[in-house]
Structures are given as structure tokens and as C-alpha cells.
Amino acid sequence: MIRLENISKIYGNQHALHEVSVAVVDGEFVFLIGPSGSGKTTLLRLLIKDILPSAGDIFVGDWNLKAINNSEIHLLRRHVGTVFQDGKLVTDRTVFENISLGLEILGKHGSALEKDVHDVMALVGLQDFDNKFPLQLSAGELQRTAIARAIIGGPKILLADEPTGNLDPETGSEIMGILEEIQKLGTTVIVSTHNTTIVDDMKKRTITLSEGNLVSDELKGKYRYEKKHEKKRQDDKKKEIHGKKDT
Amino acid sequence: MKITKTMWKHIRRSPYQSLVAILSMFITILLTGFFVLATFGSMSVLRFFESKPQLMVFFNDKATEEQVTHVKKILTDSGKIESTKYISKEDALKFYQDQNKNDPLLLEMVSSDILPASLEVNAKDPSMLKDLESLVNGVEGVELIDYQKDVVDSLISWTNTIRITGGVLGGILTINSILTIMTVIGMRIATKKDEIEILKLIGASPSYIRSPFVLEGGMYGVIGGALSWVMLSIVTILLREPIMSFLGIVPDVALIFNSLTGQAFILFQIIMLGSLSCFGFLLGCLGGIVSVNRYLR
């Protein structure tokens, strides 16, 4: 369970977030949408205590983030996997080594680590990429690697910040498919994006932010589109009928 | 194991920085090691001289038993002596005969009448000898006071000089080494900034991130310490002959340098290697810790 209560974040004299309150239940898939500068990334960074809120409380699982001191932040981050738009991969390590980092930090090594890494690589479709370096990968493959590293430690929550930002629509859909698969395995997934096509294609809960304010929190996607198109069809029909009457 | 691997990777990837760090550690540990050895050596020599009777009070032929007891009392009351031993004229003759038993001519010429009775005095500290001398000088019955003033004084002076010079030089070089390690590790941290940031974001513990850097500093120290040991071993082997001829009478020195294949010499080398490596490791780790605390907040 993730709970944000009246969260505000101010940079200088600019409100990045203004009294935002949101709750996400375990195993949910949530989109966080809004234009650039709306506060999506700020909200995600707050959830891993990369930055501190100016006001309000954040609860992630059993943690009250206000009460976590600096020496415990790493424990929170093991609980919350993160995927960044640029992947944030270590360039002088191979795909295998990058993914295994997620287990090495937990003290795992040897054959158990190898098996887990290969299992996750298979899950994200990166078989046979063991010895490739990040510079040899396409944008989609980079994101798959980043996702694999984020989930290999078995986090309860996965945050993805603009995971399709650098991808073509087809690859973007594939990445979203992987994230959906991960959610089906029981992980809470929060995806920030400004790609409304992807949001509309998936029937998921969508939180909309604008200039740091929570604008809406609703179920969107095909359902909304069908309603919208139906309304448009009805309007067209009315116009057509009125037109015939006028003539 | 992974931490060790990461540390070796750091060292391999910037060999020149590593070389500077190792050289700095090598010079520091070599000179510190040299002064420590010199201090222990001179202390050992000083101890040897201290173990000998340090002050001899010779009595004239007319000295009475009361006068001897009075001198003994003055010395004991001063609180500056460890022990005294009275050597009668007969004891002195026995001692003389023992020392010259191979020379019948010398034995024939001497009787107990011509040898003076004396008091052997061991001071608590050689620096008190001068005070003790002035206490009994001129007391009735005392004919002559003798002590190895020059030898003991110069030994004390040498030991103090070595200790102070070694301490000051060692201190300066230690600070220099810590600063060098700090700089090298600091540069390493700067080049690994992105990787460190990633590790933090994915939940690596502070110790997981810091350990390779601290161990890297420690490894420079161990390598520097081992190289210093090699150099000091070569020097001690080459100087064995002169050391034995000058200081062979000192039991500790004789024990170690008697044979290069002897147990004592091998043990001495092992202790030296262990001490220098440990000192280097601790020094390097200290530099590493200072650096990560400074640059990895």
C-alpha cells in the first residue's frame, strides 16, 4: 500500500507538487500522466526518498518515509524497484552484470544468482544478451535490461519513470506489456508517462497531474475512448438529422 | 569476493594513480619502518648498558663499615636506585682472578690489599646517574666515583634523536600518504559518480558502495608495506656484518643477526613483514575512509 497525504514539494518558490493525496493498493497498475513539469518525476522520486517533501506524509508499505533515516534508505529502495527513462545502466558492465547488480547488493552470488538473472532475462526477452554492453543495445533493450535489474530483487513495488520516452510506439507497447506481466505476478506498478496513446490502449487507473496539482484520478483507456467515440457518433448523427430537417 | 573484484578492477583501470599511491605508501612505510627499527635497536643497546652496573663507588682503604652503610643509605634514600651490591676487597680480587686466570703474571702481582672495596649501583634511569654521583661525591670514605657517563649520555641522546626525528618524519609522511590516498580515491569516486548514484538508487547499502574504495586504499598500503619489507630486508642482510662487529656484544642484536638462516632472524623478518603490511593496510584504509566520508556523503 502506498499512501501520499497532502504532499507538497517546493523548489525555490515553484510548487512542483501541491497538496497531493493519493493511495495505491497492493498489486495495482497505475499510470501517472501529465505534461512535462507537472510533477510526475518528483512524485516518483519522493517515493524512493531521493528527495524529501516540503510538507505532508508518505507511507510505503510499513514505512513512514519521514521516519526513515539515511542509513535505512537502501532498505526502502530494495522494496521499491525503479526504472528510469535513460535506463541508468552501468556502461562498463555487461547486461548480465548490470542485472546481477540487483542481487549482488543483497549479498547473493554464485549459481543461485546466475539462475535468477537468466530467469529474469527470459521474462523480459533478453535471452542471449549476457555479454552485450549497454552501448551495444537498442533503446528497447536498454529498457528491458533496466526493468530486469529493477525486478530481480523481487520488489513489492515497481516505479517506471517515462519507460517508453525514447522508444518507438511498437517497442513502447512491448515494454508496457512486460510491465503488465510483472503486475500480474503481484507487483504494484506505477508508470509515469506523457504518452496518452499507451494510456488509452490499456484500461488502467490513471492519475493526472498538472502544474503540481492532482487533476483527476480515474479509470481510463479503451472504455473512455469508446464512450468518447460513441458520443461523437451520436453528435454527428444529431447534426445529420438536423441538417436533413433544415433542408 | 565481489568487493575484492571491484577493488582490483579500480586498481587495474588507472594504473598510474595506483602507482603514485603505492609509491607514497612505500616511502612512508620504508622510512617509518627504518626509524622504528633504529629506535628498537638503540633501545636494545641502551637496555644492555642499563643492565650493567651503572655507577661504581670506590672506597678508600680506611673506609669503615659504617661509612659504607652511610653511602648506601644516602643512595637508597634518594629513591633513584634499583639496587646496590657491595664488593669487598676479597670479592674484587676473586673477580680480578676470574678475569685474568689465563695470565699467571698478572695474578701474581695483585693481592686483595691493592684492590679497593666498592659499591655497584643500578639506577632506575640512566639520566639519574649524574644526581647520584653528586650525592655521594665527597662523602667520607669515598675515593672515586666512576660511571660510563659518555656512553650512556650519548646513547640516551641518540635514542631520543632517532625517536623524535622518526616521529616527526613519520608523522609528516603519514599525513602525506593519507592525503595522497585521499586524492587518488577521491578521483576514483569522481569517475565512478554515475555508478555510485545508480547503486544508491537500486538499494545498495552504504557499506557495499564504500567498501571497495576503503579496501583499495588498504591494498595500496599492503603493497607499499610489502615493498618496504623487501627493501629493509635487503638492507639488514647487507649490513649484517657491520652490525655484528659493532653491536655483537648486545645479546638481542647477536641473537637476531647471528645467522641469516637462524630461527630468530626468520622470525624477525616475519614480524617485520606482518607489522609493515598491517601498518600499511591501516594507513591506506584510514585514507580511504577519510576520502569516502568526504566525497560520498
Image: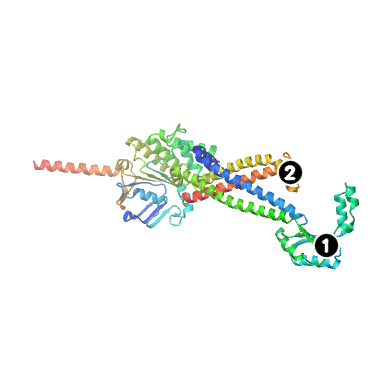
Mark 1: few, some, or many residues within 10 Å (few <14, many ≥20)?
many
Q: Residue furthest left?
A: A247
Q: Position of residue B274 (x, y in %)?
A: 64, 45
> Where B12 sits versus B32, above or below?
above
What distance separates the C-alpha of mark 2 from that of mark 1? 36 Å
- In depth, the one of B38 and A237 nearer the eye is B38
Q: Position of residue B296 (x, y in %)?
A: 47, 49
* Residue at numbered disc 1: B59
Chain letter of disc 1 in the image:
B
Local SS, label 2: helix
Residue B245 numbered mark, or none: 2
Q: Amino acid at mark 2?
A: Ser
Q: Is residue B293 visible?
A: yes
In contact (CB < 8 Å): disc 2 and disc 1 = no
Q: Position of residue B12 (x, y in %)?
A: 51, 37
Local SS, label 1: strand
Q: Is residue B50 left or right of residue B188?
A: right
Mark 2 or 1, nearer chain start: 1
Mark 2 vs mark 1, foreground winner is 1
- In depth, the one of B233 and A202 nearer the eye is B233
Point out the image quarter for the C terminus of chain A: top left
Quadrant housing residue B148: bottom right
- In depth, the one of B38 and B135 nearer the eye is B135
Chain letter of disc 2 in the image:
B
What residue is shown at x 91% (from left), y 51% (from top)? B108
Q: Residue furthest right?
A: B108
